[in-house]
Image (cartoon, rainbow, N blue to C red):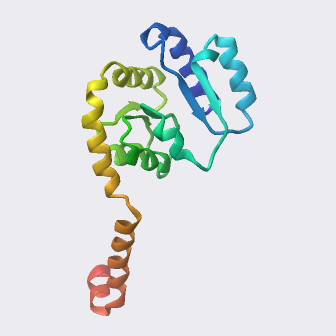
Amino acid sequence: MDQITFSEAEYQTKKRKTDAPSWKLRVVGEGPEMERLCAQARDLGVEQSVEFVKATRNAGEHYRNAAIFCMSSRFEGFPMVLLEALPFGLPVVSFDCETGPSEVLEGTGGRLAAALDVEGLAENLLYFIRNPEEWGEVQGLALGKAAGYQPELIMERWREVIELFDDPSTMREVFH
């Protein structure tokens, strides 16, 4: 999470503290800004609502213990973390970066906020917090979408593409 998004997200969290008082934001990862972000959470008075966790090879543990997954990236090419979250059936909230999130989340029930619209991101998080009855439907949709990204299926698609290049007549059709 970059410093601008974190700062604005924490402001929104503080401003809306009464909307979800028992919920906790878990930020997983590390980097040069971590110490400053921890201090910022203290300064904003939300340190009890935010947990910073170092990067881990066992991300599945965090997905299993989460109720909602939020991706606050400002830029994405192909958002692998969204693909990692889908098999856990989590409701997903994300910024609608130029590429990535909308394509992955299409048909999952996930909610997108306009890029850098921190208030919209907070509203989408609160939507899922306030509507847990929707989690079951979202879970089914997310699991269905995740099935399309399983390695076996992707490898089969690649084999089909490669086979096109094994047949010279097909290559002519593809490139003409």
Point out residue 12 in the picture as x, y percentages from the top left corner.
Answer: 51, 15
Name which residue lies at 69% across and 15% down.
Answer: 42
- Asked whether residue 99 is in view, the answer is no
Q: Out of 156 and 165, give the one closest to the viewer.
A: 156
Q: Residue furthest toward the bottom?
A: 168
Point out residue 49 in the picture as x, y percentages from the top left corner.
Answer: 57, 18
**Quick check: 22 above or below 174?**
above
Name which residue lies at 46% across and 33% down.
Answer: 66
Q: Out of 37 and 129, give the one closest to the viewer.
A: 129
In which quadrant is the C terminus drawn?
bottom left
In this rendering, position of residue 78 left or right of residue 172: right
Label count reads 0
Q: Out of 23 and 161, give the one closest to the viewer.
A: 23
Point out residue 83 in the picture as x, y percentages from the top left corner.
Answer: 43, 50
In this rendering, position of residue 53 left or right of residue 20: right
The image quadrant of residue 11 is top right
Q: Out of 96 and 26, give the one closest to the viewer.
A: 26
The image quadrant of residue 27 is top right
- Asked whether residue 127 is in view, the answer is yes
In which quadrant is the N terminus drawn?
top right
Name which residue lies at 27% across and 91% down.
Answer: 169
